Image (cartoon, rainbow, N blue to C red):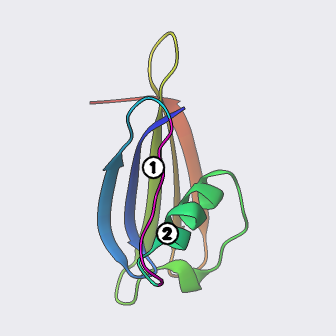
């Protein structure tokens, strides 16, 4: 289960940190509020192919990070994409 989602420089998002509680989380909002950007950020973490157009105008790199809850210890996954269209994926134990 995703406990936190951090997004930086993705399309129109400058910086966002979303902490999710246990149970069902519903994201609602008006058209154009950014709901699809949140789903796109999760898709980016899952390995979806991305291009440099996802990097916010004027930024060098977009980054998405998720912290997952587990029975042992939290794990983290991070993916970044540069304005030059290179992307990197990282994962491991969460650091705080």
Query: In the picture shown, does residue 72 fall above or below 84?
Result: above
Write the residue at 34% across / 89% down: 58
Q: Quadrant of the N terminus?
A: top right
User: Which region of the structure is painted magenta?
Assistant: 24-31
Residue 20: assigned label:
none
Residue 35: assigned label:
2
Image coords of residue 11 (percent x, y): 46, 80
Q: Quadrant of the C terminus?
A: top left
Dividing the picture into quadrants, the one containing residue 90 is: top right
Query: In the picture shown, does residue 75 fall above or below 91?
Result: above
Image coords of residue 35 (percent x, y): 49, 69
Residue that protrudes farthest toward the top in the picture: 72
Q: Tag 1, which secondary structure?
A: strand
Query: Does 89 sit left or right of 65 as displayed?
Result: right
User: Camera-side residue: 29 or 36?
Assistant: 29
Q: Residues within 10 Å of mark 1 (few under 14, many from 20)?
A: many
Q: Main secondary structure of the magenta part?
A: loop
Dividing the picture into quadrants, the one containing residue 51 is: bottom right
Query: Does 73 sit left or right of 90 as displayed?
Result: left
């Amino acid at each position: 289960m995703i406990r936190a989602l951090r997004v930086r420089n993705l399309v129109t998002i400058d910086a966002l940190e979303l902490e999710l509680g246990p149970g069902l989380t519903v994201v609602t909002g008006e058209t154009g509020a950014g709901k699809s950007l949140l789903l796109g950020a999760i898709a980016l973490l899952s390995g979806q192919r991305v291009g440099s157009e996802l990097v916010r105008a004027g930024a060098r790199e977009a980054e998405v990070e998720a912290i997952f809850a587990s029975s042992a210890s939290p794990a983290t996954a991070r993916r970044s994409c540069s304005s030059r269209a290179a992307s990197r994926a990282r994962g491991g134990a969460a650091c705080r």
